[in-house]
Amino acid sequence: MNRITVRVIPNASRSEIVGRELGILKVKLAAPPIDGKANEALIKLLAEQYDIPKSMIRIVKGQTSKTKIVELP
């Protein structure tokens, strides 16, 4: 399993991967950071980007933070 650090920017106009800076993946999400909606949107976006099932992506640290550690296969 690979772990990546992700910096999330919620409430953006659209969901997209912005780029990578100092080893941190920057992601804009259209979803608000309420009731885990931003986390769900992040998992969906990463699943689409890397062409893997959503069930194989897990946020291991930072559930309520803008900086998260995500585990990918």
Image (spheres, rainbow, N blue to C red):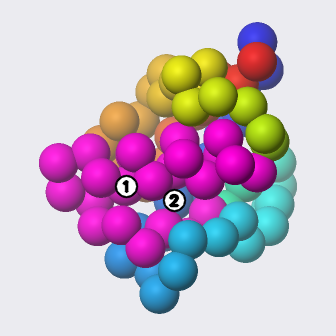
Q: Find residue 51 and report its image quarter.
A: top right
Question: What residue sits right under mark 2 in the picture?
Answer: 8
Q: Nearer the viewer, residue 64 or 48?
A: 48
What residue is shown at x 54% (from left), y 47% (from top)? 44
* Magenta-highlighted residues: 27-49
Q: Residue furthest left?
A: 35
Closer to viewer: mark 1 or mark 2: 1
Contact between marks 1 and 2 (CB within 8 A): the answer is yes
What residue is shown at x 49% (from left), y 29% (from top)? 59
Q: Find residue 30 and report its image quarter.
A: bottom left
- Residue 29 rendering spot, x and y as whole percentages: 48, 68
Q: Is residue 20 above or below residue 16?
A: above
Q: Is residue 22 left or right of residue 35?
A: right
Choose the circle earlier in sequence order: 1 or 2. Answer: 2
Q: Is residue 44 left or right of residue 46?
A: left
Density class for disc 2 (Cα within 10 Å; few <14, some 14-19, many ≥20) is many
Q: Residues under labels 1 and 2: Cα distance?
A: 8 Å
Q: Is residue 33 above or below residue 39?
A: below
- Residue 11 rendering spot, x and y as whole percentages: 37, 77
Question: What residue sits right under mark 1 in the picture?
Answer: 38
Residue 26 lies in the magenta-colored region: no
What residue is shown at x 40% (from left), y 45% (from top)? 40
Density class for disc 1 (Cα within 10 Å; few <14, some 14-19, many ≥20) is many
- Residue 65 rendering spot, x and y as whole percentages: 37, 47
Instruction: Tell me the amino acid under the disc marked 2.
Output: Val
Instruction: Tell me the amino acid under the disc marked 1.
Output: Ala
Q: Is residue 3 left or right of residue 29?
A: right
